[in-house]
Image: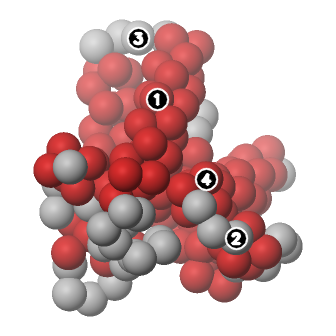
Amino acid sequence: MKWHKYLVTVLGTGYAPIAPGTAGSTVGIVILFSINWLFNDLGFEQPAVLFFNLALITAVFFLGARSVKKIHTVWKQDASMIVIDEVVGVWLAALALPIRWQYYLAALVLFRFFDIVKPLYIRKIDAMTGHWSVMLDDVVAGAYAAILLHCSLFFNLL
């Protein structure tokens, strides 16, 4: 059970007294930016980095869902300490972005906007019960943020 708590709280980030979701998202975006910057610095090609990011997001999504299921036996549904879903969501928001801190910051801000406001069916997913809904509402928020960011990049708005 201890391992599951470490994972769902992202090594304790979820215990932040103010805005634990934002704290978890911030840690997540810093981790992803650092990994991608290191890969870029080591000369990895963009397709390899993208593949690694997709594998990482997928693995953490399923591990997170499993841990959330275990944690729900002792914590309430989508307790505020559970922030692994925010990490997965913000990673999805930043997927395939160029390695510039400004883009990753924009991914964080847009993801948090969609995660907090919950437009376009995110609220319906969030209202569902179970470990999958905890993860999926943030995946959808991350996807919306990614679409908006990539459209902004395509039309040179950023």
The amino acid on which the numbered mark 1 sits, given as a three-letter code, is Ala
- Of callouts 1 and 3, the N-terminal one: 3
- Of callouts 1 and 4, the N-terminal one: 1
Outermost residue, bottom side: 18
The amino acid on which the numbered mark 3 sits, given as a three-letter code, is Phe
Q: Residues within 10 Å of mark 4 (few under 14, many from 20)?
A: some
Q: Which mark is residue 28?
A: none
Residue beneath disc 1: 59
Q: Which mark is residue 132?
A: 4
Calculate the distance from the C-alpha at mark 1 to the C-alpha at mark 2.
Answer: 23 Å
Q: Are marks 1 and 4 in contact (CB under 8 Å)?
A: no
Quarter containing the C terminus? bottom right
- Which mark is in front, 4 or 3? 4
Residue 20: x and y, percent?
31, 77
The amino acid on which the numbered mark 4 sits, given as a three-letter code, is Trp
Residue beneath disc 2: 128
Q: Secondary structure at mark 3?
A: loop
Q: Which mark is residue 44?
A: 3
Q: Quadrant of residue 73?
A: bottom left
Q: Secondary structure at mark 4?
A: helix
- Which mark is in front, 2 or 3? 2
Q: Residues within 10 Å of mark 1 (few under 14, many from 20)?
A: few
Q: Are marks 2 and 3 in contact (CB under 8 Å)?
A: no
Q: Which of the two residues, 45 or 26, is positioned nearer the viewer here?
A: 26
- Which mark is in front, 1 or 4? 4
Q: Secondary structure at mark 1?
A: helix
Residue 102 in view of the camera: no
- Of callouts 2 and 3, the N-terminal one: 3
Residue under the image location 58 percent in, 82 percent down: 116
**41 with respect to 56 (left or right):** left
